[in-house]
Amino acid sequence: MTHILIADDHTIVRKGLKQILSEGMKDVAFTESSNASETLVLIKTNPFDILILDLSMPGRSGLDLLKDVKAQAIKLPILVLSMYPEDQYALRVIKAGAMGYMTKDSAPEELVNAVTKILNGGKYISATLSEQLFASIQESGAGEGYEQLSDREFQVLQLIASGKTVSEVAVILALSVKTVSTYRTRILEKLHFSTNAELTRYAMQQKIVE
């Protein structure tokens, strides 16, 4: 029996994933969670063969959870399944320790293939992501644009560009207003902007936000 933990804050998404995997795999059991804290408790108290993880959940993000799991040396393969395009997050989660990255608009059979491959000890990397990884190895320096931002800075950029105030970002990320303001200042400096309006325009151009 394969035990799969699905962490996503949308019930309909979890139900869809369960249906796809049940139809494409044999002898599968599922456990569900809707936030990072609940997921971490489940991981520590139950044996799972794989975690399918969403990046955007209430409170701590899936990326934060991924780092927690790896920092605590928990040996659990993780497949990140997100609405964000590969070029924004895939390299970040792979470098953080995930065994694969997929977008939620991927074909159902690709999800089954990815889970099966990871369960067999492999990694799931799309052709596009493979090219990105190869390019990142060849590149030198800190990168340009939003790629040079730290994971937390990138999260702050997304939220500010989505119209959130510094106070709202602080609540969402469980940080102090002062800390978020510091991140905002760093983002502006790195991207050579001076206002939130410029950040928002840039984020929309890069399709970081819609």
Image (cartoon, grey):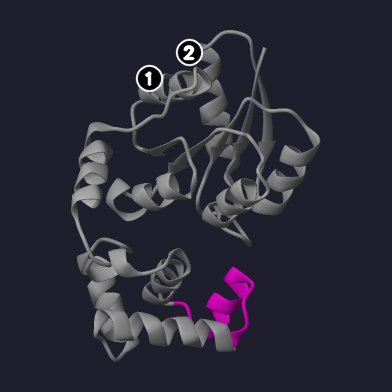
User: Is tag 2's residue or tag 1's residue first in the polypeptide sequence?
Assistant: 2
- In the displayed structure image, the side of residue 159 where residue 4 appears, left or right: right
Q: Residue at the location (52% across, 54% down)?
A: 63
| Whole-number angstrom distance, CA of label 2 to CA of label 1 | 8 Å
- Magenta span main SS: helix
Residue type at numbered disc 1 = Glu
Q: Quadrant of residue 174?
A: bottom right
**Residue occupying the far right of the picture:** 45
Taking 178 as reference, is 41 above or below it?
Answer: above
- Residue at (52, 29) in percent of width and height: 16
User: Residue 78, how many percent across, how many down?
Assistant: 53, 36
The quadrant of the image that shows the N terminus is top right
Q: Which residue is denoted by mark 1 in the rendering?
A: 109
Work out which residue is located at the far top of the displayed protein and give it. 26
**For residue 119: magenta?**
no
Q: Secondary structure at mark 1?
A: helix
Q: Quadrant of residue 82?
A: top left
Where residue 24 is drawn, which disc sits there?
A: 2
Q: Quadrant of the C terminus?
A: bottom left
- For the record, the magenta segment spans 164-177
Pinpoint residue 165: horizontal percent, then vertical percent.
49, 83
Amino acid type, label 2: Gly
Mark 2: give few (<14), some (14-19) or many (20+) Cα within 10 Å.
Answer: some
* Quarter-of-image position of residue 48: top right
**Which residue sits at x=58%, y=43%?**
8
- Label 2 sits on a secondary structure element that is helix
Q: Nearer the viewer, residue 50 or 67?
A: 67
Q: Reply above or below: 45 against 156.
A: above
